[in-house]
Amino acid sequence: MLSEDVHKAFQRGWWGLVIRGLLAIALGILVLVRPLESVAAFALLIAIWAIFGGITEIVHAIDLRQVFASWWVMLLGGLVSVSFGVAALYYYPGLSLAFAVTWTSFWLMFSGILGIAAAITEYRLGVSWGWTLAWGLVAIAAAVIALVSPPTTLAAIMGLIAGFALVSGTVLLIGAFRIRSVVGEIRHSVGEMKRA
């Protein structure tokens, strides 16, 4: 009975990994083959995510108002998120794409500043600091390029999404077939133990 339950759990896990892996690979290929439609879908996803996240935050704020003195900060964050999502749908796709470009460039700028600060600290400690400084400078240069050239930034974001989808889908499929191999090894071991 127990071995049958384990077998069913492995079967469900295996199919889940295979389906997720195939869907991820399909998404990666779709982004590469249909980049303009993918950018439009990405813009829509940002707007819907902002609305959903904002509504969730508002509900949490209302739930916590009795026990959390600063619940109104959460409520305000949720309202801002919902407002952005609605505006992003109204000004679709421009506002969402502008947000993605701006967010990416600020993230790169912040990473670059932290990299330079870390390099200065490493220099003061007398440890190797050159690569850290190089990373910081490259990140700041990428931030400037991201702000100056939004189409390039969007292409890079979509390329990263496609690459991540293809790699993660492949890893999921490898994991699924590794699980199938483990199940086969377990069956073989159980059969050997029963014969002994």
Image (cartoon, rainbow, N blue to C red):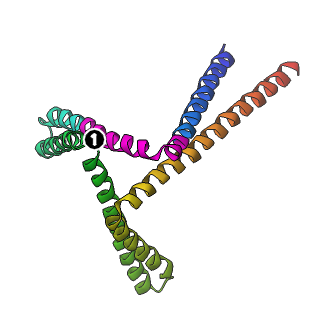
Element on which disc 1 rests:
helix
- Name the residue carrying label 1: 47
Image-based side of 163 in relation to 115, left or right:
right
Residue found at x 76% / y 28%: 184
* Main SS of residues in magenta: helix
- Asked whether 35 or 132 is in front, the reply is 35
Up/down of 191 relative to 26, above or below? above
Up/down of 26 relative to 128, above or below? above
The three-letter code of the residue at mark 1 reads Ala
- Asked whether 101 or 196 is in front, the reply is 101
Please provide the residue range marked out in magenta. Answer: 28-53
Image-based side of 144 in relation to 60, left or right:
right
Q: Position of residue 135 (x, y in %)?
A: 45, 73
- Asked whether 173 or 90 is in front, the reply is 90
- Give the quadrant of residue 109: bottom left
- Give the quadrant of residue 44: top left
Residue found at x 72% / y 28%: 183
Q: Residue furthest top?
A: 1
Residue found at x 17% / y 45%: 77
Count the numbered circles shown: 1
Image-based side of 92 in relation to 77, left or right:
right
Residue found at x 63% / y 28%: 14
Does the stretch in magenta take in 184? no
Give the position of the N terminus as an image quadrant: top right
Image-based side of 113 in relation to 89, left or right:
right
